[in-house]
Amino acid sequence: MSKNIKLLALDFDGTILDSDKRFPQETVGALRELAENGVTIVASSGRGLAELIAYQQEMQVFHYGILACGGLIYDFQKRQPIFKHKLDLGTALEILFAGQLEKAMIHVLTMDMSAVTKADLRDMRRLRMGVYRCVSNIVPDIELFTRENEHDLLKIDLYHKNPDSRSCSRQQLKKLPLTMTNTEAATLELSPVGVSKGSGLNRLCKMLNLDLSECAAIGDSPNDLEMLQTAGLSIAMGNASEQVKSACKIVTMDNDHNGVLQAIKRYLQ
C-alpha cells in the first residue's frame, strides 16, 4: 500500500460500477482491506442517498460520501449528513423552466429523495438514461415537489434528447449562479455555483485534517474532473474521455474490466 495515501475517493457510474450497474465483489474485498489498513474510503458520486439503496451491502465499506456532486457530504457510519449546500428555490424553478422548454427529463435530488414524473420515467431510454439509477420517488408534478422541498434541494439533472438540446439549456441558464456539467450523452447536471466533487473533497479533507496530497481519486466523467485535479494521486478509468485521461497521472483498465481493482492492487496496496 502507498504509505502516502490516507483517503481514496471513488466515483460510482462508469468507475466502480460496470456497464450493467453491478458492483464487483472483488472490489468490495479490496476496499475493505484498504480500510483495515487505515485508508478512509469515500464514495464520490452524482447520485444522492436514495440512488444508493440497491448497494446497501457494498456501501458498508465506505466511511463517507461526497454525493449529489458535492452538494452533500454524508457520514455512512453515523448515518447522518455532515454538510449540505442547497439550491435556492428561484434558481431551481428557472432550471425546471429551461428543462420544460427543451422537453428534457427533469430529475430533482434532495438529501433523501430522487424524483421524476411518471411520464418522464417512461421516457428513460429515449432520453439516454438507460439502466442508470434507481429513482425512488415518482411524483405527479415536479414543480410542486420542488416547491415542497425547497429547503432540501441539492441538485437537478436535465436529460436531453441530444447534445444540441443540452446546449440550448446551458444558454438559457448561463447567467444563473450554477455549476453546470455535461455528462453522458446529453445530460446536464446543475448544482449551486462553487459546488463540485472537488470542493466536496477539499471540504472533507479539512474536516479530517488530511492534506490533499494524501488523497487518491478514481473517476471517468467530466463531473469527476475537479476531484481528480484536487487529489494528490489521480487515476482515470480506461473508459474515461480523453479530457479526463489527460488530467490524470495514471490510466487504469475500463469499468467492465475492473479498473478500480487493478488500480488498487497496482498503486494502493
Image: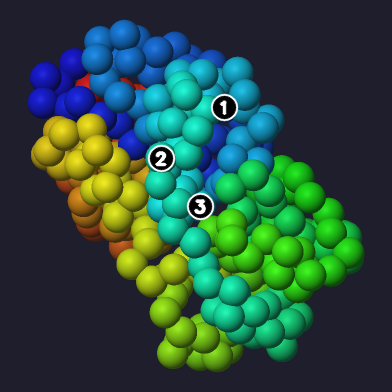
* Disc 3 from disc 1: Cα separation: 19 Å
How much space separates mark 3 and mark 2, taking CA atoms?
A: 14 Å
Task: Please name which of the two marks, 3 or 2, marks the residue nearer to the observer.
Answer: 2
Q: CA distance from mark 2 to mark 1?
A: 26 Å
Nearest to N terminus: mark 2 or mark 1 = 1
Mark 1 secondary-structure assignment: loop
Residue ID at (62%, 24%): 56
**Tag 3: amino acid:** Ala
Crowding at mark 1 (Cα within 10 Å: few <14, some 14-19, many 20+): some
Residue 93 drawn at (x, y percent): 64, 79
In this view, the residue in front, 140 or 13, is 140
Q: Is residue 74 visible?
A: yes
Left or right placement of residue 186 versus residue 144 in this view: left
Q: Mark 1 = which residue?
A: 23
Give the residue drawn at x 59%, y 57%: 152
Residue bearing the label numbered 3: 68
Q: Closer to the N terminus: mark 3 or mark 2?
A: 3
Residue under label 2, please give it.
82
Q: Amino acid at mark 2?
A: Ile
* Vertical side of 22 occupied by 1: above or below: above
| Residue 113 badge | none
Which badge, 3 or 1, comes first in the chain's sequence? 1
